[in-house]
Structure formats: structure tokens, C-alpha cells
Image (tube, rainbow, N blue to C red):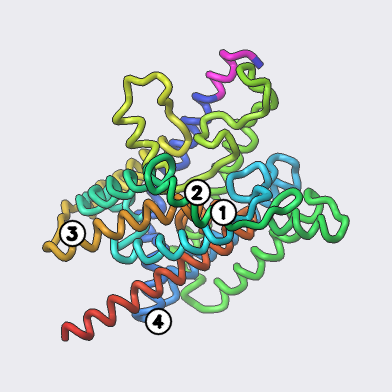
Amino acid sequence: MQASDVAALTSTVLWCAFALAVVFGAVAQYTHFCTMGAIADVVTMGDWTRMRMWVLAIAVAVIGFNAMVGLGWVEAVKSIYAGPRFLWASALVGGLMFGFGMVLASGCGSKGLIRIGGGNLKSLVVLIVLGLSAFATLKGITAVLRVGTVDRLFIEFPRGQDLPTLIAAGTGFVTRTIAPLIGLAVGAVLVAWVLRKPEGRTAQVWLGGAGIGATIVALWWTSGWLGYVAEDPSTLQETFVATNSHRMEALSMVAPVGYALDWLLFFSDKSKVLTMGIVGVAGVVVGSAAVALGTGSFRWQGFANTEDTANHLGGGALMGVGGVTALGCTVGQGLSGVSTLSLGSLLALAAIVAGGVAALRYQEWRLGRMA
């Protein structure tokens, strides 16, 4: 493949990623898809509707990704989530930080982008703080702290940390053979749980869950199959075009926000190029705005008071640092990562939920003291 062919392929991948991110933003805005909202609904009201939507999205993503593994289109170990190094402390600490922060900020990174599309200026401020703290944790002062502490604690596996690879190593089976079976089994259990109650059978739950999950699968295909180059003419090594990590990626909403700010601030620097993550951030806002304007729900919103501002700023900082430390957010780890059945993603997701529940309980405690 020539350099010109790689450039043309990169453009195609970027346009596909942008279009899929627009779909993600539109579906999420229309169905009120929100991980933090799902957790809050359960904790404060006992309403499991949005939780079933989120679990359905996970089920579709798991089934779809592992079906592609079976077809030989993608390999989990070539993603940023399922490599051989299981950073358990980073996933745990970062996940707890992110989960707590998303409650303080009234939503995770993806919800922030969706709210920006709906006219919420609070979310714009939160995303700027998130992006700055994320970039600092990628390459700045908090990156030094991250690398010197939690990143030192890990378990090294022979090949990868995704469940199909681990089971194959222990049983002698081929990962490509058993991945679709494991993915289907996990997905079927999750879908059965979604359908168990009437609220899991509504059109809105299925539009949001199946739509979001399918979008994640399509993004994996775009990066892992369409964007795969067996031998980059510049490096003579395999690569995945249009990704910041040069590995297979799907959708995430923390590090890409930091990279987007970096691209905007240093636009004249020709080494700063568009990636799937950057155009994904823009696409989610565009899709959300299109639905908000089309349905008449677009409203300008700002901070209520000083305490509201402080909570959102603190939440944005916690999400930026925690999201990079945990290798992703509720979308990056909670959907994209979990679809690979990576141990790190499963642990990070559990930590994010725990952090979110802890923050909700903390807010209840504070309100009780004030009353």
C-alpha cells in the first residue's frame, strides 16, 4: 500500500467515524441514553428503565464484537483494552474517580457532549475542564503521578486479558472459535435480563440500547477492519489508521476530548492531525444538536450558583484524570471496552458504577445535613 492509499483510507475512516458518532449523538439525545442517569434512577427512584437500555447496549456490543472476532475481522488483543497487561489498580482507582466525578458534573463525558448539543453551557465548561485534566493525565503532571503509582501495579498475561483469549489459553481451544460462543452466551443472558420486566420491552429502550450497541460494533469494524493496514509504508509495521494509539479503537469520551483541545490549540502544527476520537467528539455534538433542534428541546442553560459551578468543575477534573487512568469512561470502558470482554474493562466498569453510587449517597447525606 502506497502513502497516497493510506491517506485516502484515513479520510474514509474519519468520515465513517464521524457519521457513526452523529448517529450515536442523535440516538442518545432522542432516547435520553445516559449511564449516570441510569444509575441515579435506580438509586434514587428504583426505576430500572434506563439501566435496561444501557445493559441492552452492552449486550449488542458484546455479541457484535465477538461475532467479528469469529469472522476473523478483528482481534481483541489489538485493541487498547485487551492487551496482555492487566492494569488492575489503574482500572479500580480511575474508575472510582470517574464514577464519583460524573455525578458531581451531572453526567459523564458522553452526556456532556450530548447536553452541549442541546444548549447546555454548563456541560461546555465541564468538557473543557475534563479535556485539560485528561491531557495532563496523558502527557502532563498527572501523567507522571499516574505512571509512578497505580500503573506500576499490574498482572502480565501471556497474550491478552479478554475472556475468550484467557479461556482459549486454558483449554486449548482457538480464540476465534470460542469468542462468538462466549459473546453470544453473555449477550443472551443480558438480553434475557432486559426482557425480564415490562420496562425492558419498550420501543424507547430497544431503540436506545440496540442503536447505541450497534453503533459501537460499527465503529469497531471501521477501525479494526476497514482501517487496518498490514504494513504502513512509513514504518513497515501493521497499524490502524486515524487512531491516536495506532491500535484498534471504538468510541470513548475522555482522552479524545483532550486530543480535540490539543488539535484546536495547535491547529497550525502539521503534526496535529484528525483522528477517530476527535471527529467522534464533534459527531456526537452534531447528532445531539440535530435532534434537539428538530424536536424543539434545544435550550440555553447555565450554572445555578457558585456551589453548582464548583461541583461541575470538580466533577470534570475527576472525570478527566480518572477516565485516562482507567483507560476509558462509561462509553470507552463501559461499552467499547466491555464489548471485548476485557478483565480491565469489566473491573473499570464496576468501579465506575461503585463511584457513581458513592457520589449519589454522598449527595443524599449532604442534603440531609442541610435539611
Does 84 sit above or below residue 196?
above
Which comes sooner in the sequence, label 3 or label 2? Answer: 2
Residue 105 in the image, given as x and y percentages of width and height: 29, 61
* Residue placed under numbered mark 3 in the picture: 309
Q: Is residue 307 visible?
A: yes
356 relative position to 306: left or right: right
Does 14 sit above or below residue 50?
above
Does 228 sit above or below residue 159?
above
As drawn, which residue projects farthest toward the right? 172
Q: Residue at x 64, y 17 (%)?
A: 233
What's the CA distance linking mark 2 and mark 4? Answer: 39 Å
Q: Check whether the beta carbons of the residues at disc 3 and disc 4 lie within 8 A of each other.
A: no
What's the CA distance linking mark 1 and mark 2? Answer: 7 Å
Packing grade of label 2 (10 A; few <14, some 14-19, many >=20) is some
Quadrant for the N terminus, please.
Answer: top right
Q: Which residues are magenta?
A: 2-9
23 and 313: which one is in front? 313
Q: Check whether the beta carbons of the residues at disc 1 and disc 2 lie within 8 A of each other.
A: yes
1 vs 4, front mark: 1
Residue 312 location, quadrant:
bottom left
What's the CA distance linking mark 3 and mark 4? Answer: 28 Å
Q: Residue at x 12, y 62 (%)?
A: 306
